[in-house]
Image (cartoon, rainbow, N blue to C red):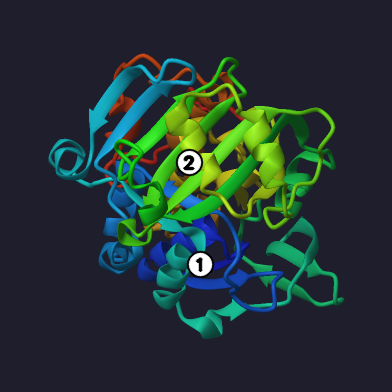
Amino acid sequence: MKTLSIGILGAGIGGLCAAIALQRAGHQVTLFEQAKAFMRVGADINLTPNAVKALDGLGVGEGIRRFAARPTHRISRMWDSGEETSRLEMADAAERQYGAPQLTIHRADLLSVLAAAFPLESVQFGKRAVAASKEEDGVTLRFSDGSQAKMDVLIGADGIHSVVRAALFGQEHPRFTGVVAFRAVVPASRVAHVPNIQAFTKWWGPTPQSQIVTFPLNRGEDIFIFATTAQDSWHEESWTTPGSVSELRDSYADFHPDARALLDACDEVLKTALYERDPLPYWAQDHMVLLGDACHPMMPFMAQGAGQAIEDAVVLARALEHVQTLEEVNEALLGYQHARLERASQIQIGSRGNQWLKAGGNADWVYGYDAWRIEPTSSATSKQH
């Protein structure tokens, strides 16, 4: 097997998962991260069974379970009447049906487990990329400090403002959706009177843009609250911008008393604008390839953003595992693209529509996916642009 030199731009969830899997496959992997160190920032994450199964295959499942909560159900309730419109049993039932449970965890705790599984000396911090280009002997990545790095393969795991995406498609900008998100964490003891507080519960609002989602964190000791609403006037993208608790409560003043009780328990809240892009026609070209938000940033309404990045990472690593020559790299990358693009695009569009599981339905096509069994092979029907 050819040992490839692989650079991964972005040491987030998808980048770290790809790094772990590719190094385990025997390749020389370097992670480039613009932050100066791994820091405790970011939002809380819902890992549905498809994501947990992929993480278990990476050998990090036990570590994640030490931090995570394990929701009992996935419940849909209507915003005004409180009526339950769907209920899926999770926990042990999901493990029996899908091979893994649903887990909910803070992004920083997930990253700490992933970072511990990859050698720190193979991470270059403080590296803000400004350009990527194909060269005769591979790919060159250039940084704002004037340095550069050459590699056989460059993976863009660098998020919605991806430099690698710009190298493939040119400069363009994500689209503000007109939706903002509030998020808060409250002690579970403070909302113990709210029914099913240890479940993943989605309150469906009067419009597709309006919802409140709650789920347990920190082994059930805390409850995470994530609420979205339409608002054209707010464009701040940061996940660490303080919001107004009174604005949060006013935005959902007509919701059911159980939902309002959750918001009444909030002492502080963060607020961010949500951005998206349309599905791409291709993800790979000239020894460069995209994964996660770099190629399919999506709305949070199906709770699959992190899960799809994790799936990408596993399938991409499997596609590159048996590459024998540099000439085989692009074929392997097309195999990954062929295996992943349709599914991720379908979830990207479905997340935008925000109707999935509102009134029941089959979750198997999302939760039952196994990234370790999907064959990442190219096909005559898999066309480039």
Q: Residues within 10 Å of mark 2 (few under 14, many from 20)?
A: many
Residue 182 image offset from top left, x and y in percent: 63, 43
State left or right for residue 206 relative to residue 377: right
Whether 163 is drawn above or below 181: the answer is below
- Viewer-proximal residue, 241 or 327? 241
Whether 81 is drawn above or below 55: the answer is above
Residue 9 showing in the rendered view? yes
Whether 71 is drawn above or below 67: the answer is above
- To which residue does mark 2 refer? 262
Which residue lies at the image location 32% right of the left edge and 39% below the top edge? 374
Residue 39 image offset from top left, x and y in percent: 60, 73
**Marker count (numbered):** 2
- To which residue does mark 1 refer? 4
Residue 361 image offset from top left, x and y in percent: 31, 16
Which SS class for mark 2?
helix
Which residue lies at the image location 39% right of the left edge and 41% below the top edge? 376
Which SS class for mark 1?
loop
Type of residue at label 2?
Answer: Leu
